[in-house]
Amino acid sequence: MARKTKEDAQKTRDQILDAAELVFYSKGFTLTTMSDIAEAAMLSRGAVYGHYKGKLEVAIAMVKRALDQVKPFQNDMALSPLLNLKQYCMQEIRSYIEPSSIQRVLFFLYIGINDTPDLLHLRYAWEKQRIVQIEKLLKDSIAIGELKLNDDFELISLYCQSIIEGVFSIVYFGNLPDTQRWQKAEQLCEFGLQRLYK
């Protein structure tokens, strides 16, 4: 039997992680088995276990792969920091809603992990990146006088996070027609962020 190359091994790992993404998304962490992942990947259980010790290792690899593929937010230099914050909020909301690898993984991290410590740690790291980006944009806004320095910075940061999570909930779980949801999401972000202006 021919020995597998590194490329073959990586292709198999990707096949496993692609399948795991769909299975974890639909069944959550607790109900998913290695047999489910193997079946979805159209591989034997032995092939899956040849690359991963168990479903936690698969889930961690799947989450890390998806989060590593997320492109960092790029400020539009033509916009003010608060307008860039609106763009950032919309980018975040889209990543949670538009069908994609990152959407399935984020859904899994927030809905399907059943407080598994290693997976919670990855979710908290994702959230920390979001907080850092929001706070950077808020500091830039203070620097040019859009926001006052004496405003409660931590409260404003939490408020911006709540805008993302609130608009996500309305757009994802609400019954807005598909033709209106992004328009409404943008309007809600804009309306929420306008409260920051003095």
Image (cartoon, rainbow, N blue to C red):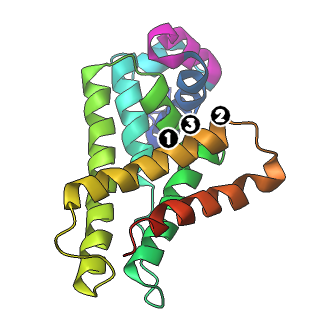
Q: Amino acid at mark 3?
A: Arg
The numbered mark, 2 or 3, whose residue comes first in the sequence reads: 3
Left or right of 33, for residue 145? left
Is the C-beta separation of discs 2 and 3 under 8 Å? no
Please tell me whether residue 33 belongs to the stretch shown in magenta. Answer: yes
At label 2, counting other C-alpha atoms closer than 10 Å, the crowd grade (few under 14, some 14-19, many 20 or more) is few
Residue 88 horizontal/vertical position (percent) = 46, 65
Specify the segment rendered in magenta. 28-40
Q: In front here: 164 or 3?
A: 164
| Residue at the image position 41 percent from the left and 47 percent from the top | 162
Magenta stretch mostly in which secondary structure?
helix
**Location of the C terminus (image quadrant):** bottom left
Secondary element under disc 2, as helix, strand or loop, is helix
Which disc, if any, is residue 104? 3
The residue indicated by pointer 1 is 8
Residue 55 horizontal/vertical position (percent) = 40, 17
Q: CA distance from mark 2 to mark 3?
A: 15 Å
Q: Nearer the viewer, mark 2 or mark 3?
A: 2
Q: Amino acid at mark 1?
A: Asp
Secondary element under disc 1, as helix, strand or loop, is helix
